[in-house]
Amino acid sequence: MQELKAHLLDSYKQLVLALKNKRLTNSLIIGGDVALGSIDLALYFTKLYLCHENGDEPCNKCKSCVLFESASHPDFRVVLASSKEDCDKNLDIVNDIGYVEQAVQDNTTNKVIRIDSIRTINHYLYESAVLAHNKAAIIANAHLMQEGAANSLLKTFEEPPANTLIILQTNAQEKLIPTILSRAYKLNIKKPSYEMCYAFLKSYNIDDSRIVKAIGISGYNPNLALDIINLDNDKLIEQFITNFVLYIINPQSIDKENKCIQLLLDLEPKVRDLFLNEFIVQILKYKVQFSLDNLCLLDEQNVKVLYKIKKDKLFKAYSYINENLLDDSQLLLKLQETRLRELLHLFKEVV
């Protein structure tokens, strides 16, 4: 696995210090978006916990580190949200870190963490370590645990076996049951600074104008910002804004309406949601005298038209986005298209 990104190093050092000072309990909750690297941090720290050397970094040489990288570590498992088909293929509990990194980002709505998976991992944790060292399990997207699964895990939280570590990775700690929250050491990944994001993206020799927009759209999330650029979503967004301005000038234009909708549908769903929110917020900020220098999606040309949109329409659009579009990635295309069209219609007769 790759080295940790720079913005994760402070969180990692905090965990290492807690481990060395024996402040880390047998259970750990890592909170933060997958795109921020929460699963990367969980995997990297687990590798250290299992390492046979007593350093601050995995040694990458001992038997444990070698087995960890080769997807064959006998004392390490990851529980994944799964469908019935996944369970039948034994893909609900794995130790292949490459597969984990892909699976954790799967937003398929019919996948949950099942009670049978948790019962299996509970039994596994109480077995003796094959390498006569530590054992570890990560529960990825732990907020997707069914109630029975969470209650089953609680028993292990209350009486954890020695020399074991259970890590719950989640972007929604509030969905975990209080008794689990109260028994775990908790760490929330902080978003990196603008300077850190910029330095990370600049290392890929990306043009400054693309970097600025991608950082703004991603909400200072360097991994997501890089994805936005690699998928040319920032260019699609520029095209949308151009066509949206023309639509505002002539809201009866079906051609511009259809073009705007198609450009939004071409965006990655998460990027689309973030962009729409940020776009509305930036127009509102400009209307209350924010400088254009701090509004990456607006420029002197488009803002002359966008400024004319009344605040009440902007607030209605913002509410509509959050009530109807967020987490909409699994909706049928036709339903997505209908809702996006309804959103655009909120801007008819803007002045």
Image (cartoon, rainbow, N blue to C red):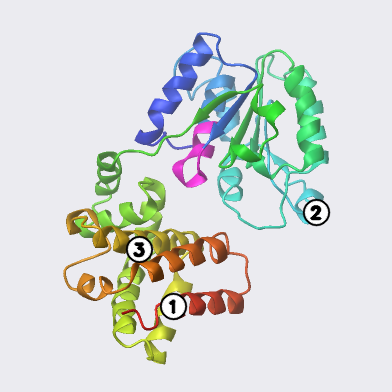
Region of the chain picked out in magenta, as a range: 32-42
Disc 3 target residue: 279
- Residue 156 found in image quarter: top right
Q: Nearer the viewer, residue 84 or 91?
A: 84
In the visual, does 281 lie left or right of 87?
A: left
- Of 318 and 335, which appears nearest the observer? 318
39 in relation to 163, above or below: below
Residue 47 in the image: above or below residue 97: above
First in sequence, mark 2 or 1: give its number: 2
Q: Amino acid at mark 2?
A: Lys
**For residue 135, above or below residue 69:** above
Dot 1 falls on a residue whose secondary structure is helix
Label 3 secondary element: helix
Question: Callout 3: few (<14), some (14-19), or many (20+) C-alpha neighbours within 10 Å?
Answer: many
The nearer-to-camera label among 2 and 1 is: 1
Q: Nearer the viewer, residue 274 or 221?
A: 274
Callout 2: 10 Å neighbours few (<14), some, many (20+)?
A: some
The kind of residue on which mark 1 rests is: Leu
